[in-house]
Amino acid sequence: LGGVYWPDDGAAMLFIGLLALLLGGMIGACLAKIAKGTLFILRVQNFLLRPLFYGSGLFYLAEQLPLSWRPYLYANPLFHLVDASRAAFAANYDNSQIIMIVPLAWFTGGCLLLIALYCPSKRLGYDPL
């Protein structure tokens, strides 16, 4: 150890970092809009965010999990970002399970949720929150 490590694919690493930044910002903006107070954020952190981060595959590889858990792992957008980061750093990493459409779909769904939260329908005549 002790050396300087640069990614093999710097452009992919920039794209992954940007997508992770946008995904985290979207989750934070959604929580900020829905939150009624600090206690709500703590509950959401325990219920939603902690399993999302623990299930991201940061501390283990997907091959180490039982086959019955893998569909849940593949639905996690952070898993694909972590695995894509590994593939960008190590050229010989097997990246056959990376599907970048999953984080993009989560980001798009979150943006649509933000639009629905911040721009209530004029037809309804009330703010849903």
Image (tube, helix red, strand yellow):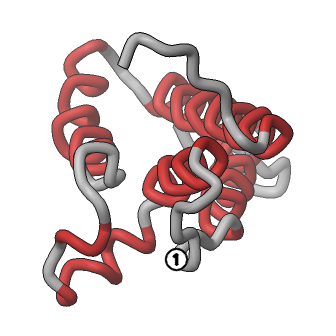
Label count reads 1
**At 32% from the left edge and 15% from the top edge, which residue is drawn?**
37
What quarter of the picture does the N terminus occupy? Answer: top left
Place of residue 74 in the rendered image (x, y in percent of width and height, measured from the top left): 43, 73
Determine which residue is flagged by label 1. Answer: 97
Residue 88 spot, x, y in % from top left:
66, 47
Most distant residue in the bottom direction: 68
Q: Is residue 26 above or below residue 12?
A: above
Q: Secondary structure at mark 1?
A: loop
Locate residue 16 relative to residue 54 in the image: left or right: right
Q: Is residue 51 above or below residue 23?
A: below
Left or right placement of residue 17 versus residue 63 in this view = right
Relative image position of residue 39 (x, y in whole percent): 20, 19
Three-letter amino acid code at the position of disc 1 = Gln
Q: 44 or 92, which lies in front?
A: 92
Taking the spot 71% from the left edge, 59% from the top edge, the residue there is 104
Query: Residue 11, how many percent across, how many down?
Result: 85, 39
Residue for point 62% across, 37% down: 20
Q: Nearer the viewer, residue 29 or 122?
A: 29
In terms of depth relative to the viewer, which is nearer, 57 or 107?
Answer: 57
Q: Is residue 28 left or right of residue 49?
A: right
